Image: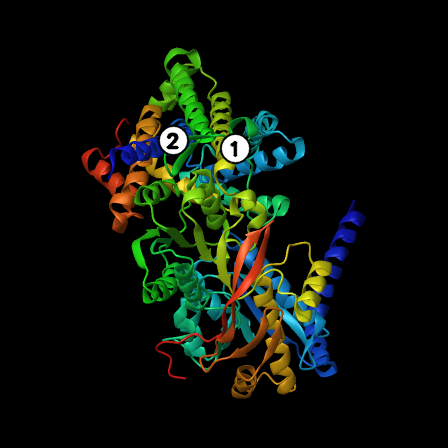
Amino acid sequence: MDPVFIAIQLLNGLQYGLLLFLIASGLTLIFGIMGIINLAHGAMYMIGAYLAYDLTLRTGSFWLALLLAVPIAVVLGLVIERLFLGTLYRRDHLYQVLLTFGLILVLNEAQRIIWGNDVQSVAVPPSLSGNITLTDNLQYPVYRLFVGSVCLLMAGGIYWVIRHTRLGIVIRAGAANRDMVEGLGIDVRTLFTLIFSIGVGLAAFAGMLSAPMTSLYPGMGDNVLITCFVIVVIGGIGSIKGAFLGSLLIGQAATFGPVLLPALASVIIYLIMAAVLIIKPRGLFA
Amino acid sequence: MKLARIRKHTRHLMTAMGLLFLAAFQPLMAQQNREDQATPVRLGLMLPYSGTYAPLGESITNGLKLAIKQNGDQLGGRPVEYVVLDSEADASKAPQNMSRLVKGDKVDVVIGPVHSGVAMGMLKVAKQTGAIMIIPNAGLGAATGQLCMPNVFRTSFSMWQDSYPMGKVAYDRGYRKVVTITWNYAGGKEDIAGFEESFTKAGGEIVKQILVPFPETQFQPYLTDIASIKPDAVYTFFAGAGAVRFVRDYAKLGLKDSVPLLGSGFLTDGNLDAQGEAAEGILTTLHYADGLDSEVDRAFREAYGETYERKLDTYAVQGYDAGMMLAQALDQTQGNSADRDALISALAGVKLNSPRGPVAFSKAHHPIQNIYLRQVKEGRNQVIDVASRALEDPARGCRL
């Protein structure tokens, strides 16, 4: 392969990986700190994308839609945590899996009732609809570069919060030993609500950002969810750093794998997961 | 207080008695119904109503119900009852779902599926039970090829039938080196095989065949790969959400201007609103098109537009023709669906004056029909030529 095209593929993989990180970070936070396997995480990604679609149609501006959709998603997360999850913390994991699985069905059905079965798309905002010419027959859409940058900024922001704020200390402590944190008098209940809302918000935000690059269809979050679980497992449950590196790794694997090893295209990310688990059974950074 | 309790008890007792009453008399009432009017023809709809293919399931259902409505809500003098089942386009659940419809719900005819993988599972059960099945979409060759059987019909197309004519079109337009790309599943592979067969027969060369894991829609790596190969044209098969994303990415990454995109008609059918500007100019071949301008087509479009909000697409025509087919066949058997052999031979003899043009059925129970060359113009799949007239699928491996 031509070095120019290798560079372009690296860029493709980086951008995809960064987007995956936005979704996987929320998943790993919720899983690591609250101990909840949130199967509805992919559905929230879908809801985010459809919110962006709907509000862009209503307001005529993608940016305004983004501004409105983020709080809606966070509030939705808050409501779900307070109304449903809150009653199940003391129970077995299986109850939470059942609940969040049920949420997938409910959210997918709600999506169908509200927005219908048709495939939809969102126009790229005019200010970012340009292209950068890479070769004589290939361009790179500015919007994708923008999404990559936003994801990178978000990653930096999350890292800063976790490393350098009081909330971050509590989150890290919570991931390490939840009972001890509770014993030290920290209000775990509020912390959980916060974490869940933020996690859901991140997934929905990723859905909103990707809406102009992808097509919207019922159940679009289900495939993303599986990829993100792979990332969480690779990175180590609860580790943001692990999720970040795992996302970049999977992003590159999903880009180069199918082109270089077409026969393994559909299993390559699982092979990587298996390899990581053989070497480090608890993930890279757990 | 005592009075209140007695009242409550009485109420409960009354309710219980009411239920007993209903339970006792229900069979009697049902029997009376059966004597009053003919038992309904039970149609089992096994179509996807969720996931990527949900819009297709909805269109087919709309078309089918419209045909039966136009037939006076009856088939051969009997009312019609629908048993609707979401196939979820999930191949692993197909045999079990089909068995449920055939053995549990005891439907007279099963209509489905959309997805070729699901069709494989359904065909197995159709073989075992002899249940009559009309396929209103899934274009896998085997259904009217190696696995053909008397009780299975198709009102749609085969992958081969829709893509084969495009190979010659591509060669005649001067393309010599072509990349083909599709999802790695039976339907996609058969579609590009039809194109590759006629394109290489004409003298063209397939420089690369790309198979994307189904239902992946992350196309950027593949498109970058295509750009590095620089072919004369790209031939593709995608449908639904994947088609929308592929066409948009193809235009967004700037490939559209330098490498013309050809496809099976499913690339653009029902997707033009979501694809928008990115689809303009794409050439496709399919058994239906906009602007056919026949009287039947105009009447169908008008009736569909009055009944449904959804924009009309090819899938609706396939569903509509399944309904028309049943109407004709059951008229001939005078509503008798119990005699399967009679119904099968009536179905096999059906000739449709379909919105897509004349349709007859081959020995393998597959439609013999025109394949149109279409170009996307101003958000329509405008017909520009008949790519192949009254094309019959070769039905390879079928011994009917």
Look at the image and tell me in which quarter the C terminus of chain B lies: bottom left
Q: Is A223 left, or right, of A263 in this rendering?
A: right
| For marks 1 and 2 on the same chain, the one whose residue lies earlier in the sequence | 2
Q: Which mark is residue A41?
A: none
How far from the left and from the top, in percent, is residue A141?
A: 45, 32
Q: Which residue was labeled with disc 1? A: A208
Q: Give the answer, above or below, for where A88 lies relative to A157.
A: below
Which sits in the foreground, B330 or B361?
Answer: B361
Colour style of the rendered protein structure: rainbow
Task: Depth check: give the residue in front, B383 or B114.
Answer: B383
Which residue shows up at 62% across the image and 29% down it? Answer: A61
Helix, strand or loop at disc 2? Answer: helix
Q: What percent of the width, then of the height, locates residue A54? A: 62, 37
Residue hosting label 2: A15
Crowd around label 2: few <14 · some 14–19 · many ≥20 (10 Å) = many
- Identify the amino acid type marked 2: Gln
Kindly check if marks 1 and 2 are in contact, taking CB atoms under 8 A apart as contact. no
